[in-house]
Image: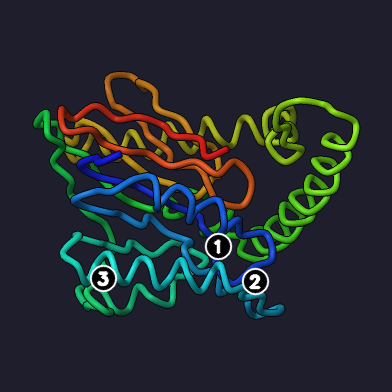
């Protein structure tokens, strides 16, 4: 499928939980004029504890570089897990442009702020040790989920079920955090006179209206395996890679 733009976030290359094979399937199935990588593409936090770099993850990097080299506009907006790249704002790495944020004009004329979103997470900003322990706990849930998925397949239980996603939407404080995050980031987009915002960070993919501002979250590639694509008429679509 050829689309105008692809938006990906939270790939977490360098970790055991990165579902690089499913991302490769998605990239093979979708061509684009522009590809936006909206933060936490490489997980330097996790790599400080131990690096897991599979052949599929290496292929992901090669494929991204190849797409940029062959004329696709590829832009990387660092997140908190790859924040070391923020000091290279405006630099090209193998034809991939590094930017703090990006102003994207869709085909229908709507203006979107592209930003990872950790700037609007009070835990990440002011309690980094809590954020790091939360990251470890989340990775633990994802690994438990892999075993549960295997058991479900052995028991012929259809469909994919996410333990991490279930916990996120059932725990009251987690739900409150997500809504606070959405409210804060859409408020910032409204103040800067954008029509919408496309972000990542909280691993909760959605497209929805938030008091007149289109809030779009790309999701992640460790659990839900989701991406956003822009069609040539400007319509945004959430894709789940099964």
Measured Cα–Cα span from mark 2 to mark 3? 23 Å
C-beta proximity under 8 Å, tags 2 and 3: no
Q: Is residue 52 above or below residue 172?
A: below
Q: Nearer the viewer, residue 123 or 229?
A: 229
Q: Is residue 49 above or below residue 81?
A: below
Q: Quadrant of residue 162?
A: top right
Identified at 79% across, 45% down, the residue is 145
Give the label on residue 46, or none.
2
Identified at 73% across, 32% down, the residue is 161
C-beta proximity under 8 Å, tags 1 and 2: yes
| Picture coordinates of residue 88, whole percent (x, y) | 29, 79
Q: Considering only order in the chain, which callout, 2 or 1, is on the residue closer to the N terminus?
A: 1
Give the label on residue 96, or none.
3
Q: Nearer the viewer, residue 147 or 201?
A: 147
Identified at 29% across, 30% down, the residue is 236
Q: Is residue 150 left or right of residue 225?
A: right
Q: Considering only order in the chain, which callout, 1 or 3, is on the residue closer to the N terminus?
A: 1
Q: Callout 1: 10 Å neighbours few (<14), some, many (20+)?
A: many
> Is disc 3 placed on a helix, strand or loop?
strand
Measured Cα–Cα span from mark 3 to mark 1? 18 Å
Q: Is residue 152 left or right of residue 226?
A: right
The residue that label 1 is drawn on is 12
Identified at 20% across, 60% down, the residue is 72
């Amino acid at each position: 499928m050829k689309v105008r733009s692809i938006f990906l976030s939270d790939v977490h290359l360098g970790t055991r939980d990165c579902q690089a094979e499913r991302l490769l399937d998605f990239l093979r199935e979708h061509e684009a004029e522009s590809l936006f990588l909206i933060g936490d593409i490489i997980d330097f936090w996790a790599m400080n504890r131990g690096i897991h770099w599979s052949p599929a993850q290496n292929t992901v990097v090669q494929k991204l570089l190849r797409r940029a080299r062959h004329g696709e506009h590829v832009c990387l907006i660092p997140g908190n897990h790859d924040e070391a790249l923020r000091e290279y704002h405006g630099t090209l790495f193998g034809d991939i442009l590094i930017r703090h944020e990006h102003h994207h004009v869709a085909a229908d004329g709507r203006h979107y702020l592209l930003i990872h979103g950790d700037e609007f997470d009070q835990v990440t900003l002011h309690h980094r040790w809590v954020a790091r322990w939360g990251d470890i706990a989340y990775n633990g849930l994802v690994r438990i989920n892999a075993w549960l998925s295997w058991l479900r397949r052995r028991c012929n239980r259809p469909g994919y079920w996410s333990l991490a996603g279930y916990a996120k939407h059932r725990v009251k404080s987690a739900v409150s955090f997500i809504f606070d995050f959405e409210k804060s980031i859409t408020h910032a987009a409204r103040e800067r006179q954008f029509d919408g915002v496309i972000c990542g960070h909280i691993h909760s993919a959605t497209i929805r209206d938030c008091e007149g501002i289109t809030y779009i979250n790309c999701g992640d590639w460790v659990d839900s395996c989701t991406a956003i694509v822009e069609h040539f008429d400007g319509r945004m679509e959430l894709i789940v890679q099964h």
